[in-house]
Amino acid sequence: MEILPRMVFLLVLAALCGGETQGADRECATFTNLGFPDAFLGTKLQVRLLLYTREDLQCGKLLLHHNLSAHPLFNMSRPTTFIIHGFRPTGEPPDWLYTAKDLLAALDDMNIVLVDWNRGATNLNYFSVVSNTRQVADNLTDFIQNMENHSASLASIHMIGVSLGAHISGFVGAKLNGQIGRITALDPAGPQFNGQPPEERLDPTDAQFVDVVHTDMDALGFRKPLGHIDFYPNGGADQPGCPSTIFSGKEYFKCDHQRSVYLFLNTLNKTCNITSYPCPSYSDFLNGKCLSCPDFMPSGCPIFGYYVIKWKETLLKLRQTSAYFSTTVNRPFCKTNYVLNMTAWNSEPRWGTITVKLHGDRAVSEATVNHKAFKFQQYTDTLLLAQFDEDIYPIQRISLQFSTSNLVGPRYKLRLLRFWLGALEHRDRPQLCRYDIVLAEKMEVHHREVSPEVKV
């Protein structure tokens, strides 16, 4: 008679603790966590694929290459996104990895596969890690071919590769004859890849659509275009808020490079849309030469990030597009862009910079167009790009200030026949216009009544 109560007790205990009947299904695989000693000694390559789905988003399942049927949550009719990290000099898991997984799952019902090659990527010897990238690509290629054998569509695969992970994605895509649906490359690694032919790095033929963002092209990243569209935020090199000296420690080395990840992740939660502007260079963009979208882009200028896929057909026709935008220091990174048109009245040319402030009910946002001195010439329109960290709307008043680089000598005045201000990303808003203004050097001039004109 004592056996029955004991069995009941064990069954209840098993249910509470997730006993053997559920243990195999509930066993969660986690990303490999290593440390600096591992990096110092070097690690032997091991590739692990961790599956996450909406059904079990907090519990990763270790995928087996040759027994896909053992994973009932791995549905081949869903799209599949692979996330591939890069060089890991200290061995710990990337801090953004699980955030990316959660944000992607919120967007669509998909298979999310975290490619864990931390053993192989953790090594102080970068060149040794680079030599492992081909083997990682071979491993992934075999797995994807097995997926295809189980009725998965290559066109529904999206590979998101960071640094070395970007080139790994390219190697996989090349082996699969460019049939993968999309590769997103987040600051592809530059060292050992700069100057290499297309077959030795990522290139546009590796997938049906390749989008790339460059944030550290003067150090750890790749400089030249690699995709159908290449984004260069803040010019693609130094990112706002990142340390400029080595005294800041490891942030000096990784901040610019890693900003590509955070910029892309920010586009997943739709906090704000960052419009990019096709342009020959960042300086041309800042100089206001690329503020209107070409006629061959009927949907307007491409939005940076995850949703640039909506511009796929147009961008494929162009073959390669480089696009630029600026960001703020902190999330969500979006700036609000205005075009400022000023018509000077001075008989003599004036050289200087302009600061514009937008005043709302309780906030003020400032844009200083000072990356170079502009020439203001009589009866000539000067077009400027004014970028604000905060979107002030409705605008109650505007203030302007004219400055020159003269430290000694006379103070100049800039007289304007007219200025008008139009929001680039909010073309439904009216232009704001003012006539006959005198700007004394370094004196802020306020205008409480700004008349709306025709829409931008």
Image (cartoon, rainbow, N blue to C red):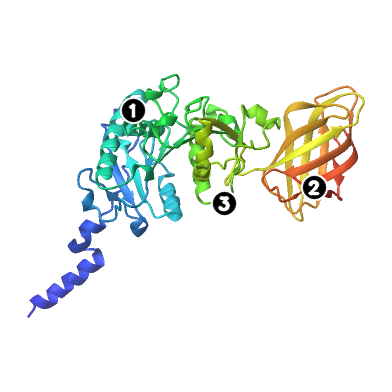
Mark 1 vs 2: CB contact within 8 A: no
Would residue 178 be seen by someone viewing this image from the given angle?
yes
In the image, 172 versus 371, the foreground residue is 172
Q: Which residue is mark 1?
A: 129
Q: Quadrant of the N terminus?
A: bottom left
Left or right: 256 in relation to 171: right
Where residue 361 sits: x, y (%)? 77, 56
Give the mark toward the camera: 2 or 3. Answer: 2
- Quick check: 383 above or below 106? above
Rendered location of residue 309, percent (x, y): 49, 43
**Horizontal relation, residue 126 to residue 426: left or right:** left
Q: Is residue 352 left or right of residue 2?
A: right
**Which residue matches tag 3?**
271
Question: Judging from the image, what secondary structure is the residue with disc 1 in?
Answer: helix
**Residue 274, x across and y down, in percent:** 59, 43
Residue type at mark 2 is: Val
The disc, 3 or 1, on the residue closer to the chain's N-terminal end is 1
Query: In what quadrant of the picture does the C terminus appear?
Result: top right
- For the residues labelled 2 and 3, the Cα–Cα distance comes to 29 Å
- The outermost residue toward the bottom is 1
Secondary structure category for the residue under label 2: strand
Q: Quadrant of residue 41?
A: top left
Taking the spot 82% from the left edge, 35% from the top edge, the residue there is: 342
Image vertical order of residue 320 relative to residue 450, above or below: above
Residue drawn at x 43%, y 44% as measured from the top left: 95
Q: Secondary structure at mark 3?
A: loop
Query: Residue beneath label 2, please?
Result: 454
Q: Position of residue 320 (x, y in %)?
A: 52, 30
Q: Badge 3, how many Cα within 10 Å: few under 14, some, many 20+?
A: few
